[in-house]
C-alpha cells in the first residue's frame, strides 16, 4: 500500500467513526457512533404531535398516558436492540480492520523476507561466480604450465635425438672407415 492510500483509508475510517488506533474510543464504539449520528425516537416525534390534541376527559388522558408509556418502553427496547445491533456491527468492522491490518503487516514481513532471500541468493551467485572464475583461471594456469613444460620437454627430446643420431652417424662412419681400411688393407 502506498502511504497516500493508507492515509486516505485512515481519514475515511475517522469520518465514519471507526477509530484507527489500537485503543477503542472513549465510551466505546457505540457511544462514539451515536454521538456522531443521534437516533431520534418515536416518543420525541409523538410528543410533538400529541401535544396538539387536548383531551378533556381525564380517563382518556390516563389511557393516552399509559399508551404513551407503553410506546416509550417499546421504543426503548427497540433503541436498546438497535444499540446492540450497532455495537455488534461496530465491533465486527473493528475486527475486520484489525485483521486487514494484521494481514498487511504479515504481507510486508513476507515481502521483506523474500527480498532478503533474493539478496542472499544474488550474493551466493556472485561468490560462486568469483570462486568459479578463480578455479577456472587456476586450472587454465595449470594447463598452460603443463603445455609449456611439454613443449620444453619435446624441444629437449628433439635435441637429444639429434645428438644421439649424430653420435650414431659418427660412430657408424668411424666404424665404416676403419672397416674399410681393414678390408683394403
Image (cartoon, rainbow, N blue to C red):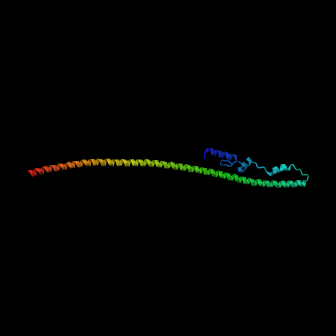
Q: Residue furthest right?
A: 56
Q: Residue furthest top?
A: 4
Q: Residue furthest left?
A: 185
Q: Position of residue 16 (x, y in %)?
A: 70, 47
5 or 67, nearer to the observer: 5
Q: Residue at x 63, y 45 (%)?
A: 5
Q: Position of residue 148 (x, y in %)?
A: 32, 47
Q: Position of residue 46 (x, y in %)?
A: 83, 51
**Left or right of 16: which side holds 114?**
left
151 or 22, nearer to the observer: 151
Q: Residue at x 30, y 49 (%)?
A: 150
The count of marks equals 0
Q: Position of residue 121 (x, y in %)?
A: 49, 50
**Left or right of 12: which side holds 60?**
right
Q: Residue at x 21, y 49 (%)?
A: 165
Q: Residue at x 84, y 55 (%)?
A: 67
Amino acid at each position: 500500500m502506498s502511504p497516500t492510500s493508507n492515509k486516505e483509508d485512515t481519514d475515511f475510517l475517522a469520518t465514519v467513526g471507526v477509530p484507527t488506533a489500537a485503543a477503542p474510543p472513549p465510551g466505546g464504539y457505540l457511544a462514539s457512533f451515536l454521538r456522531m449520528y443521534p437516533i431520534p425516537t418515536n416518543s420525541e416525534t409523538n410528543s410533538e404531535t400529541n401535544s396538539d390534541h387536548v383531551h378533556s376527559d381525564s380517563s382518556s388522558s390516563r389511557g393516552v398516558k399509559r399508551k404513551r408509556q407503553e410506546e416509550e418502553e417499546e421504543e426503548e427496547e427497540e433503541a436498546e436492540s438497535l444499540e446492540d445491533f450497532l455495537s455488534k456491527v461496530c465491533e465486527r468492522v473493528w475486527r475486520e480492520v484489525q485483521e486487514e491490518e494484521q494481514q498487511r503487516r504479515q504481507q510486508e514481513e513476507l515481502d521483506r523476507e523474500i527480498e532478503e532471500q533474493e539478496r542472499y541468493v544474488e550474493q551466493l551467485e556472485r561468490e560462486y561466480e568469483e570462486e568459479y572464475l578463480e578455479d577456472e583461471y587456476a586450472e587454465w594456469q595449470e594447463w598452460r604450465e603443463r603445455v609449456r613444460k611439454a613443449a620444453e620437454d619435446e624441444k629437449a627430446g628433439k635435441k637429444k635425438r639429434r645428438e644421439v643420431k649424430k653420435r650414431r652417424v659418427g660412430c657408424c662412419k668411424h666404424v665404416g672407415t676403419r672397416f674399410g681400411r681393414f678390408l683394403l688393407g
